[in-house]
Each structure stands twice: as C-alpha cells, then as structure tokens.
Image (cartoon, rainbow, N blue to C red):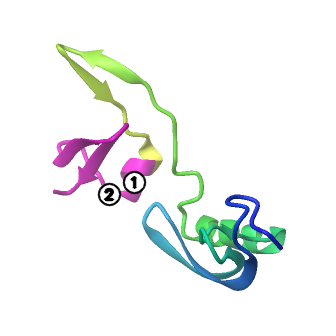
C-alpha cells in the first residue's frame, strides 16, 4: 500500500517506540512508510497505546491555559495535573525559554 502522506513510499509492517510527554509507553505494531518513515496504527493498537498512557497517568496531561497579566509581566497558570506530574511546588525553580513558536518551561533546573 502506498503512503498517504508522502505518496512515494510503501507501507510495511514494523514496530514503533511510542512516547508521550517524554514517558516511554513501549513498542507497538504499525505500518511504516519506507520513504518518509510516517507510522500508522490500527484501531486495536491505538487503543492499547491509549490504555498504556492512562495506566501511566499521563493521558490527558496536555491542557489549555490562559495567559494573564501580573505587574508588567505575563503569567501562565500551570494546571494541577501537570504540576503534580512534574512534582512542582510553590516556589519551585524553572528555566523558561522560547523555541520557535513555543514557550518551553523546564522544571527543576
């Protein structure tokens, strides 16, 4: 079968190493493009990845938040689930920097 992404490669059975939010979830079966290396999982495998993420308590950690003004600066609220996952406490130190169109906050630096 031809790759629907690059339309040049052929999909072949293989294994992918799946991570979410930097947490390793394991190896899973997938169809992998011989050209662009894009991977595709079937419904059963996708559910297995989701269940593994839920067991590791990282499913749904991505959240929207508001940017607010505080003094002359802007502030970003960190949702409780993310703070708990990263073991952040009031007064914890972090390093913040831009990366293309992202704001990266590194905890415990």
Tally of numbered tags: 2
Residue at mark 1 = 84
Residue 107 among magenta residues:
yes
Residue 84 falls in which quadrant of the image?
Answer: bottom left
Residue 29 horizontal/vertical position (percent): 71, 82
* 103 is higher (above) or lower (below) than 67: below
Front-most of 90 and 44? 44
Q: Is residue 92 visible?
A: no
Q: In the image as oriented, which residue stretches furthest toward the front?
A: 8
> Which mark, residue 87?
2
Picture coordinates of residue 22 (x, y %)? 42, 66
Indicate whether 90 appears above or below 74.
below
Q: Are marks 2 and 1 in contact (CB under 8 Å)?
A: yes
Per the rendered image, the range of residues in magenta is 82-109
Which mark, residue 53?
Answer: none
Quarter of the image that includes the N terminus: bottom right
The alpha-carbon separation of the residues under discs 2 and 1 comes to 5 Å
Find numbered disc 2 in the image and state the secondary structure of the residue it sits on. Answer: loop
């Amino acid at each position: 079968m031809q790759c629907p992404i690059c339309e040049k490669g052929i999909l072949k059975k293989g294994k992918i190493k799946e991570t979410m939010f930097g947490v390793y979830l394991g190896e899973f079966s997938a169809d992998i493009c011989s050209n662009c290396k894009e991977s595709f999982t079937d419904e059963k495998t996708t559910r297995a990845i989701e269940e593994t993420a839920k067991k590791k308590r990282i499913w749904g950690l991505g959240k929207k938040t508001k940017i607010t003004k505080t003094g002359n600066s802007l502030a970003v609220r960190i949702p409780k689930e993310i703070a708990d996952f990263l073991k952040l406490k009031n007064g914890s130190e972090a390093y913040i920097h831009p990366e293309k169109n992202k704001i990266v906050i590194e905890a415990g630096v």
